[in-house]
Amino acid sequence: MGALSNIKVLDLTRVLAGPYATMLLADLGAEIIKIEQPGKGDDARAYGPYKNGESAYFMSLNRNKQSLTLNLKTPEGKEILKELVKQVDVLVENFRPGTMERLGLGYDVLKEINPRLIYAASTGFGQTGPYSQRPAYDAVVQAMGGIMSITGQEGGMPTRVGTSIGDITAGLFSAIGILAALHERETSGLGQLVDVAMLDCQVAILENAISRYEFTGEVPTPIGNRHPSIVPFETFETKTSPIMVAAGNDRLWSTLCELLGLDIACEPCFATNPMRYENYESLKPILAEKFMNKTAEEWQDIFVEAGVPSGPINTVDKVVTNEQVVARDMIVEVDHPVAGETRIPGIPIKLSRTPGEIQQPAPVLSADTERLLEKYLGYTAEQIAELREKHVI
């Protein structure tokens, strides 16, 4: 039994931020009923690459879920959703603010049907504020949220982070908000609205960029792979390939100098991190020269033995075969009924008593419609056939 095995979720989300949040809940045992548009489904089903006509993008975000197609623009579709709301704990949607209200399915309506309902809305800019009605995608909020302005090579163009971190962080914060609301409900007996904005999440993960600006008045800019406050904490070229080294305190700095054959650890201009930061331009070439004496593999062995944090810059093909990644079950194989066998990322949250589990691959569109309508609403085969004829499901 998963940690959330008693939780039932209606998932009206599509593409990435919302599906990522509900996937996390599904991995931890929640029952996810994914509501999709008849004939089309989640927009992500149209994103490649494909295997036997099934989207790898969609499959990577919708494991452990059930697909129920429902036309929410029909009176019958709305009534079915309301009936389902009576029986679930959580509803998650990522439409633009006001969309659910126009359908007559907003939080104010649904909370009257089920006062215990946790209603989570993940949007680009939130339910309030002057930008609330603007459309948003990951790249837009990365740009507006400041993370692009501090990403990239020094002196180069601001750069989008390589994964959709705008969507993913919104998914993570949505899941946290849902879990917090579920916990509070144990005391109050009442549900609540969870309002998560992608832009808010980008501001929240700017880490020390905001504090650095507030303290110094200097606007942070891209500085490549080095840390903005800790030295040495960056990539160095070697005889073969770059290696990332992170000497995060003075003890590690001293050890690193010893391994590199340098006697500068205690020099006043380098002895402490503030001094190393202040004298970075003179220190970097000294270190860079030493790193060129060995291969990345040789340095890696030396640093691992000495306990200096370091690692290679792995490409994706190396990540999926890395012995630590494999040992932690972070690459798992699932058998999709159409696409066949495929490998996807595993579950990063390891619980000792109630571990998460990938029980099934992403569903084929509408695969569970008949079964779920029968299970939750007691619909007969004749009733379901009539709904199909009316294009309700």
Image (spheres, helix red, strand yellow):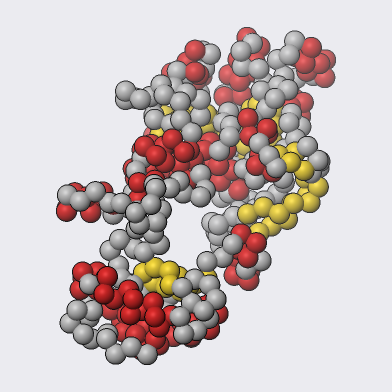
Residue 316: tell me if it is visible.
Answer: yes
Q: Quadrant of residue 20?
A: top right
Q: Position of residue 294 (x, y in %)?
A: 50, 84
Does residue 337 sit above or below 43 in this rendering?
below
Task: Residue 191: tell me if it is visible.
Answer: no
Q: Is residue 128 left or right of residue 390?
A: left
| Residue 36, quarter of the rendered image | top right
Of the pair 258 and 120, the residue shown nearer to us: 258
**Place of residue 123 in the rendered image (x, y in percent of width and height, measured from the top left):** 45, 30
Image coordinates for residue 351, horizontal then vertical, percent: 55, 59
In the drawing, does residue 121 fall left or right of residue 10? left
Q: Would residue 278 appear left or right of 143 to someone viewing this image?
A: left
Q: Provide residue 143's location: percent of width, then percent of height.
A: 39, 39
Q: Residue at x 51, y 44 (%)?
A: 164
Q: Is residue 381 above or below residue 41?
A: above
Q: Nearer the viewer, residue 237 or 143?
A: 237
x 71%, y 54%: residue: 343
In the picture, which quadrant includes the C terminus? top right
